[in-house]
Image (cartoon, rainbow, N blue to C red):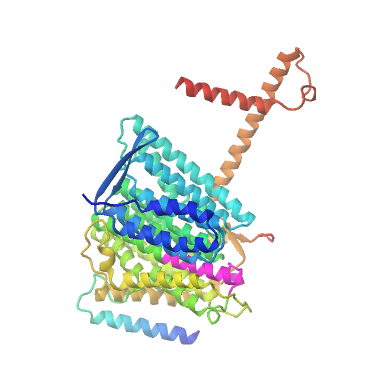
Amino acid sequence: MTEWAHPAGPFLVGATLVALAPGHVRRILLVVVPVVALVLAAALPGAGEATGVAMGQAVSVRVDALGRVFALIFALFGGLGALYGLATPRPRLHAAAFVATGAAIGIALAGDWLTFYLFWETLALASFVLVVDGGTPRATGAALGYLLVHLTGGALLLTGLVWHRATGGTGLVGPLPVSGPGFLILAAFAVNAAMPPLHAWLTDAYPESSPAGSVFLSAFATKSAVYALARVFAGVDGLVWAGVGMALYGVVFAVLENNIRRLLGYHIVSQVGYMVAGVGLGTPLAISGAAAHAFCHILYKGLLFMGAGAVVHATGRGRLTDLGGLGPRMPATFALYMVGALSISGAPLLNGFVSKSLVVAAAEAEHRWGVAALLTLAGVGTFLSVGLKLPALTFGGPDRGLRPAALPGPMVLAMVLTAGLCLALGIAPGLLYRLLPFPVAWSPYTPDHVVGALQLLVGTALGFLLLRARLAGKRTVTLDADRIYRAVGRWIAQEAGGAAARAADRLEAAVVALADGSPGRSRAAVGGPVGYPLLLAVAVLGLALALLAG
Amino acid sequence: MTGRVGVLAGGAVLLVLLELTLPVHGAFPAGITLAFAFLGCLTLMGVAKLLGAVGLQRPEPPDD
């Protein structure tokens, strides 16, 4: 029997410690805790299970190849993110980041639905705190929106799980059909995966967090959902087209975007689309491709958010229209950002080239030529926005007289290490392949594939140069799908509010009439409005009776 | 600007020539990937601009 320990443990215990420890001890913990967790994650066996009892329910932790690769990258990135934010003196940020990391690992290793659900909601709450860490009224508003959407998603998940169990379903996390409770669970996963039109929480919230907070946010919620989809809904064909739609939706909206971190947020939607498409294809190569892309995406997208966060940290500005000419003043940040940008664009020698190619190759292997072509087109759009537009308008272009502040050493070191990992996995894909759930024999480094990838980059660059003037940033906001459900929500709230007010008035009138027999008696005579408290009391009483009856 | 276009165009020609020398060819003629990227880039920008033009892109509020 192989001995192993849960790698979420150090993060969850460490969260309490970093919240309470003084500054110098906290900085030590921010390095030691992730290292311990990473060692535990790397030592996880290929297969294993542990069971226990919590709240009267059997709970279990399960390790297999799929969960292991996600647990490993979550633990690894938890450490890189902690290093990036090491100089940020806010215990709340570090505690929330550790809880989020631990929760993401917990999701990847959950063996039963109860454990899964608890970690799922814990991740939502910790991410809410990470958004609030932005410290502005806009950040607070975005965080409340984030919480509302994710609690709704959590409610869908819980309802689906209760329904699933009530109809005799197993308590173990595993494949489900897309019908009845399975549909609700899929909808909950779709919310976390940021599938349009359920994605606006991401592009609203991530740019509003602090630089370090957005680095953590970029890694966990959507990739946990990808893991969940791969675990429960692999091979559902509808996910192929949902993924293709995500890949294209993100790149089109990114072209319009002026805020650099929101632009990167749209590209999370796009890149997660590749993973969702891979899950939908459902073949061993596609599932391994989805897992590989999640692994690599966490690294290069984290690096991109680190680079953009460094710009925000150093200049206090985050819009393309306010930036420009920073390349000579921030050469290291520029170079490291470009490693991430070329990686997400699928440039050879970088990890995105390997993982993105796996998903496209899986589509080609199934003769899904349209899927492969549209995912390749999304890659063109990715290089256009992340590899050309954003750096050209931030690090290139006219000098706007910005004098960026020096970056803390740990921030630069985290970017260097993350860039090094992007390069290492790109040069030696075997390092990545040995972590994947299914064996991969496919090699990305064939002459025709490398030449094809270079042609994609050069062709896109030519198009960019031709129309560069039209891509210049504008001080605009982009109306997204959230406008629709915000309008619907506002209408429902108004209607529900009106109905509640009418019910409260009638209830109040009835109680007053009962009290002294005069229906026309004013509110002032009974000491003010009593309708709403009465309505609330009736509602609570009804709920309590329903629970007792149940 | 002209210099950059020249370098990229030169690189594009070299890549197509390189593709022609490869022992293994795909089902499509050499340079098709390059053309796909160029036209795809223009298409995506066109679609985005169209969405912006029909009202999805609005001036940022002054207090934003």
Q: In this image, B19 relative to A104: left or right?
A: left
Residue at image position (38%, 44%) is A116
Q: Is residue A66 visible?
A: yes
- At 63% from the left and 29% from the top, the residue drawn is A499
Depth check: A22 or A312 in front? A22
Region in magenta: A300-323
Residue A275 at x, y percent in the picture:
35, 57
Q: Is residue A274 left or right of residue B25?
A: right
Q: Is residue A422 left or right of residue A482?
A: left
In the rendered image, residue A505, in percent from the top left (x then y), is placed at 69, 25
Query: Which x, y percent locates residue A242?
Result: 38, 52
Q: Measuring from the top left, give residue A282's x and y in whole percent.
A: 27, 52
In the shown orientation, is residue A285 left or right of residue A22?
A: left
Q: Residue at x 60, y 42 (%)?
A: A490
Q: Quadrant of the C terminus of chain A?
A: top left
Residue at horizontal 53 percent and vertical 54 percent from the top: A20
Total labels: the figure holds 0
Extreme top residue here?
A517
Q: Is residue A301 magenta?
A: yes
In terms of image quadrants, where is residue A167? top left
Front-lying residue, A38 or A28: A28
